[in-house]
Image (spheres, rainbow, N blue to C red):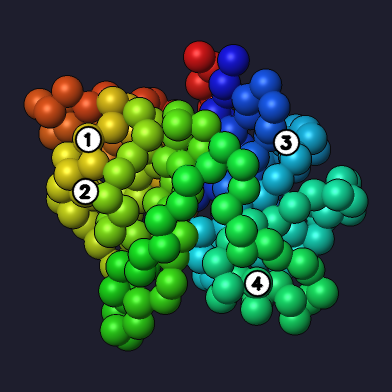
């Protein structure tokens, strides 16, 4: 059995029989009070796509480690350097049951394109971080829809390129609840023409299969 739980923004918890993997523990989830952190439960590993604070918050990572001392954080070298300043160890290896693509973040308004690691776990779920460069996706894709570096149109084009069966909307913190629903509906209608289903998961919702 696999369960995917949306927390906020790009932070998701994917639980299988063997692992409970937390993706991108950013400051929105940790600081804004939208999710009861104690409801997250046991986390066995953390996967971080890139170094931006909305995807990795050192205090959040420390909080997770305090709950489970042998927790392993996996990411790229940029994140390892960032968290190393906080005395948090990061493995740049690709963990068992996981595939990774090292790509670039989409171009920011200042022109920067930081390194970004896309993760696919158990052949089931892909989290691309803030990149539309990954070449492959598992059947379920976390799809960043609202960001200063991209558009809903660009997100739909990316999903069509990698052709998952289903997508979960991420990167939507600055939208209201009604705004998130509106964007999910808009993108979902566009993707339905390609046989891709938009899963209606808002913050705190989960999917079990």
Residue, x 68% and y 34% (percent of image)?
20
Give the residue furthest to the bottom: 110
Marks 1 and 3: in contact by CB < 8 Å? Answer: no
> What residue lies at 22% left-to-right and 35% top-to-bottom?
163
Which residue lies under the disc numbered 2?
158
Question: Which residue does the image show at 58% across and 23% down from the upper left?
Answer: 3
Query: What residue is shown with label 3?
Result: 40
Q: As rendered, which of 95 and 160 lies closer to the eye?
A: 95
Q: Is residue 3 left or right of residue 183?
A: right
Cα separation between marks 2 and 1: 8 Å
Q: What is the distance, in whole Å, between disc 4 and disc 2 at their CAs?
A: 28 Å
Q: Are marks 1 and 4 in contact (CB under 8 Å)?
A: no
Q: Quadrant of residue 125 in the image?
A: top left
The picture places residue 39, in percent across and down from the top left corner, at: 75, 33
Specify whether residue 174 is in view: no
Mark whose residue sits in front, 2 or 3 = 2
- Lateral position of residue 96 relative to residue 131, left or right: right
Q: Nearer the viewer, residue 191 or 50?
A: 50
Q: On the image, numbered disc 1 is attached to which residue? A: 163
Say which quadrant the N terminus sits in. Answer: top right
């Amino acid at each position: 059995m696999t369960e995917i739980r949306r927390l906020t923004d790009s932070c998701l918890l994917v639980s299988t029989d063997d692992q409970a993997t937390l993706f991108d523990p950013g400051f929105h989830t940790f600081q804004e009070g939208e999710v009861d952190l104690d409801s997250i439960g046991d986390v066995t590993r953390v996967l971080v796509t890139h170094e931006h604070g909305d995807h990795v918050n050192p205090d959040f990572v420390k909080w997770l480690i305090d709950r489970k001392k042998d927790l392993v954080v996996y990411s790229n070298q940029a994140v390892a350097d960032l968290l190393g300043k906080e005395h948090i160890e990061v493995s740049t290896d690709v963990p068992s049951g996981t595939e990774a693509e090292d790509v670039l973040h989409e171009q920011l308004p200042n022109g920067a394109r930081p390194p970004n690691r896309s993760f696919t776990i158990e052949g089931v779920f892909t989290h691309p971080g803030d990149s539309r460069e990954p070449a492959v996706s598992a059947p379920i894709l976390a799809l960043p829809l609202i960001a200063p570096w991209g558009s809903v149109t660009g997100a739909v084009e990316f999903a069509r390129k990698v052709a998952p069966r289903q997508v979960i909307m991420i990167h939507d913190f600055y939208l209201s609840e009604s705004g998130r629903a509106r964007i999910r509906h808009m993108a979902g209608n566009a993707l339905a023409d390609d046989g891709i289903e938009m899963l209606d998961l808002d913050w705190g919702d989960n999917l079990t299969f």
